[in-house]
């Protein structure tokens, strides 16, 4: 049985005039230890899709239909108590903005230890001990001493590592990363990507990696899915999708990447990418 | 060329959908109209005494009854409203003009000047207001203009602080930097670019200050420092009414109710404005 | 030999921090850009590239020599007239436009402040710029929030170009945009280069983009210039360790494709 099986997921938001279908009948499955990248431009619904799996999309006003079976439990219709047991413990999530993802009023060690205290009911000292070990595992230098610091004393890359430590500390089976490197510098991005890849291999953890950057995703994930306007238009092994994209939209996205063109040549913008009504 | 959907229209739309705010606005309009037009059409003058008909209960001739000197209570309440509104608007206008200019300049110029200007505000704020007003009134004769000035002189301090804070924040925004790069002079940047974007907050603050000012006036008049008889404001009416509280409670309830309703209306409108102008809730923004 | 359009010599920007030791954000950077060419300035956050751009624009006090067409410029003396010649395109297309101004007001203001053009001439110039940047006439009456990110960036570019400056600094102009929109804006900037002979300083952290637009590349690290030269040389055969690290940090696919599409040596 797949670890995660999403069937006909739809998320709709009411607007002043009409409705917005953020996610339309999306279905995919994820095996244990599989790495899946979901790529799309803004408005494609990629973030809403995974946020709804985690119960982060308030309903109302949103309307969510479909099923999302995580190890047999439907995340979209289970009792809140059941969801809380899974969320943070078996499925962990990290976000884009390292500035706002950490609580500025809590010491780093306490934030990293919190999931353990909550889900594993560990005593403070034991939890803190494991938290420091987790910080070391993600490459925070001098972890024991720095653990007592506050988030603002860390750089963006370090904060992202702290988030990863916090997410991984309960040994989750699935890690959802929503644009975790978009706000980081190029060299730091490389470090974080390598870290995620290493941890994933070490623990056999499944990863869903969301990004707007196809190339970044291809570096980390074995499989790749492309979303556009709420629909999942392509899904397959990254090696195949990047070289022989099946869907015209994917092909168009690849084609207009500057790396494909000799310097100075104008980028070919395929009609599939033009927004209705002229240049975007 | 199509007409754009400005942020102002968007805010107005949202405001109109807020029922409490609309109710508040309507109530204010009614109250205002009554206070302005009422005394004109009333058959009685506010200081017209009828010593044969004192403390009368509500009836056909006097809809709210009369006070201890036989004056028509309804007319007095409506005239009192005129005074209360007048003081509120006048004092707020004073505080607006002084406060906005002071705060905008302080926030925009920044540096040492800003420090000095704000320290002056801090010191002035620390002065006990009541003492100050009492001093002023005892030195100069009691006039209604003094009341405007005294209240305005205190309110502008908070307005200056708020405007300065807003300007400080906006000054960092990139479109202001863009203005500098485009070579616009400082006055242009301040008045055409910065202030219009601060207007929203100012408006909200104004609608929330007016209740405070009204209450202050009522309080001063209640103490006998504000408007003097026979002129009436809601505060002085309350003062008179409290004296008659046990036997003729309506003389206290009527002005009290009028004041309370007006304050409620202003607060609802102010809240509605704040929500309507909150850019985060704007649906127009993508 | 004609002097380069822009020349910077030993530029230094120091921030004083009260009691703490002052921070040298830019330490003696020298570079030059030939007319009609684009210099790509790369580096990570905190390297000083944005500070450098603000100093060149006279928004920050600095030491060193800045020269336009061989003549040294002084922001204190040059003032408003100088501003016509040098413009800036910001990263965030929403924050860089006044939300209360229509497109027409945004484009008209620079023409009025600097040139005092009568209405007819203003409209003509504005129309020219709209055509150049691919904006429709209908956009004139609209407000920034009614446009998408890519269109807002076009408006920002239009505003920067309406005075026909000699030199433009583009500070991460496409970083906040989607890939497909990015491509359109890059094409637009390319058009500006060929049709207006625009000289540009293009700041970016995205090496693939820089490779595409820049004739020469300069790399900054911690306030200093560590490497500079023709784009092909810096980006394909870097000499400095830091540049090599930046290139190695690119995703595998991007690196491979870049090498594949490089023009034959």
Image (cartoon, coloured by chain):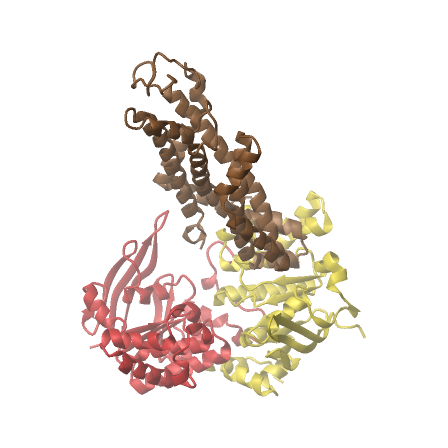
| Residue at image point 66% right, 68% down | C55
Q: Which chain is brown?
A: B
> Is any part of residue A120 visible from this angle?
yes
Name the quadrant containing residue C23: bottom right
Quadrant location of the N terminus of chain B? top right
Determine the residue located farthest toward the right in the rendered image.
C1
In this rendering, position of residue C52 left or right of residue C71: left
Residue B22 location (% of width, % of height): 38, 37
Residue C54 location (% of width, % of height): 64, 66
Residue B30 location (% of width, % of height): 40, 28
Q: Which chain is red?
A: A
Residue B193 location (% of width, % of height): 59, 50
Figure check: B121 above or below B69: below
In this rendering, position of residue C263 left or right of residue A122: right
Figure check: B168 above or below A104: above
Q: Nearer the viewer, residue A22 or C242?
A: C242
Q: Colour of chain C?
A: yellow
Q: Nearer the viewer, residue C151 or C245?
A: C245
Quadrant location of the C terminus of chain B? bottom left
Say how many tags the image has: 0
Name the quadrant containing residue C57: bottom right
| Residue at image point 37% right, 67% down | A227
> Is any part of residue A139 visible from this angle?
no
Figure check: C233 above or below B269: below
């Amino acid at each position: 049985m797949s670890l995660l099986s999403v069937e006909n997921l739809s998320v709709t938001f009411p607007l002043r005039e009409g409705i917005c279908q953020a996610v339309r009948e999306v279905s995919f499955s994820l095996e244990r230890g599989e790495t899946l990248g979901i790529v799309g431009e803004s408005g494609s619904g990629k973030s809403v899709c995974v946020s709804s799996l985690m119960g982060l999309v308030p309903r109302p006003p949103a309307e969510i239909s479909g099923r999302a079976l995580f190890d047999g439990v439907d995340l979209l219709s289970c009792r809140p108590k059941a969801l809380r047991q899974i969320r943070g413990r078996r499925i962990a999530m990290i976000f884009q903005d390292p500035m706002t993802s950490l609580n500025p009023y809590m010491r780093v060690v306490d934030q990293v230890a919190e999931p353990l205290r909550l889900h594993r009911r560990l005593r403070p000292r034991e939890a803190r001990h494991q938290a420091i070990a987790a910080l070391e595992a993600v490459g925070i230098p001098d972890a024991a001493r720095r653990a007592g610091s506050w988030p603002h004393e860390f750089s963006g890359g370090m904060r992202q590592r702290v988030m990863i430590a916090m997410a991984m500390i309960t040994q989750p089976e699935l890690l959802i990363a929503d644009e975790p490197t978009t706000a980081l510098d190029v060299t730091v991005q490389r470090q974080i990507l390598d870290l995620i890849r290493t941890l994933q291999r070490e623990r056999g953890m499944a990863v869903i990696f969301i990004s707007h950057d196809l190339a970044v995703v291809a570096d980390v994930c074995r499989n790749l899915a492309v979303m556009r306007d709420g629909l999942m238009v392509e899904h397959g092994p990254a090696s195949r999708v990047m070289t022989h994209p099946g869907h015209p939209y994917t092909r168009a996205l690849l084609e207009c990447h500057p790396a494909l063109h000799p310097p100075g040549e104008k980028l070919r913008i395929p009609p599939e990418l033009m927004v209705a009504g002229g240049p975007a | 060329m199509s007409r754009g959907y400005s942020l102002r229209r968007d805010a107005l739309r949202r405001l109109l959908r807020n029922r409490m705010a609309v109710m508040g606005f309507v109530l204010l309009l009614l109250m205002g109209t009554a206070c302005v037009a009422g005394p004109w059409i009333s058959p009685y003058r506010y200081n017209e005494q009828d010593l044969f008909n004192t403390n009368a209960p509500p009836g056909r001739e006097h809809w709210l009854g009369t006070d201890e000197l036989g004056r028509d209570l309804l007319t007095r309440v409506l005239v009192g409203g005129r005074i209360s509104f007048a003081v509120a608007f006048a004092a707020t206008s004073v505080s607006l003009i002084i406060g906005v200019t002071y705060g905008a300049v302080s926030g925009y110029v920044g540096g040492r000047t800003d420090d000095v200007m704000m320290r002056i505000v801090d010191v002035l704020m620390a002065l006990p207001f009541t003492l100050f007003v009492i001093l002023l009134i005892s030195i100069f004769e009691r006039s209604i203009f003094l009341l405007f000035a005294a209240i305005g002189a205190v309110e502008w301090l908070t307005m200056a602080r708020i405007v300065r804070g807003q300007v400080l924040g906006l000054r960092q925004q990139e479109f202001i930097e863009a203005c500098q790069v485009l070579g616009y002079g400082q006055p242009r940047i301040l008045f055409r670019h910065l202030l219009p974007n601060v207007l929203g907050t100012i408006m909200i603050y104004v609608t929330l200050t007016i209740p405070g000012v009204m209450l202050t006036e009522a309080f001063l008049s209640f103490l006998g420092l504000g408007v003097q008889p026979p002129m009436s404001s809601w505060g002085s009416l309350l003062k008179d009414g409290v004296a008659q509280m046990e036997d003729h409670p309506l003389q206290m309830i009527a002005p009290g109710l009028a004041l309370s309703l007006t304050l409620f209306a202003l607060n609802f409108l102010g809240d509605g404005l704040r929500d309507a102008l909150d850019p985060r809730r704007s649906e127009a923004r993508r | 030999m004609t002097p380069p359009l822009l020349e910077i010599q030993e530029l230094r920007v120091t921030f004083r921090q009260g009691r703490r030791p002052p921070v040298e954000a830019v330490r003696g950077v020298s570079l030059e850009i030939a007319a009609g060419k684009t210099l790509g300035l790369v580096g990570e956050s905190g390297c000083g590239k944005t500070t450098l751009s603000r100093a060149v624009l006279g928004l920050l006090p600095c030491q060193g020599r800045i020269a336009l067409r061989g003549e040294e410029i002084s922001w204190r003396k040059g003032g408003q007239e100088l501003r016509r010649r040098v413009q800036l395109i910001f990263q965030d297309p929403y924050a860089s436009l006044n939300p209360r101004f229509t497109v027409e007001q945004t484009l008209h203001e620079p023409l009025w402040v600097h040139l005092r053009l009568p209405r007819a001439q203003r409209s003509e110039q504005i129309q020219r710029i709209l055509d150049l940047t691919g904006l429709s006439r209908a956009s004139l009456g609209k407000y920034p929030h009614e446009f998408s990110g890519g269109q807002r960036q076009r408006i920002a570019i239009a505003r920067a170009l309406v005075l026909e400056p000699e030199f433009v600094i583009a500070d991460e102009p496409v970083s906040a945009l989607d890939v497909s929109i990015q491509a359109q804006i890059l094409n637009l900037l390319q058009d500006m280069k060929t049709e207006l002979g625009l000289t540009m300083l293009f700041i970016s952290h995205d090496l693939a983009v820089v490779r595409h637009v820049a004739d020469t590349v300069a790399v900054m690290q911690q306030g200093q210039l560590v490497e500079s030269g023709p784009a092909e040389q810096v980006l394909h055969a870097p000499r400095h360790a830091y540049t090599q690290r930046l290139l190695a940090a690119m995703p595998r696919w991007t690196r491979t494709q870049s090498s594949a599409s490089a023009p034959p040596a």
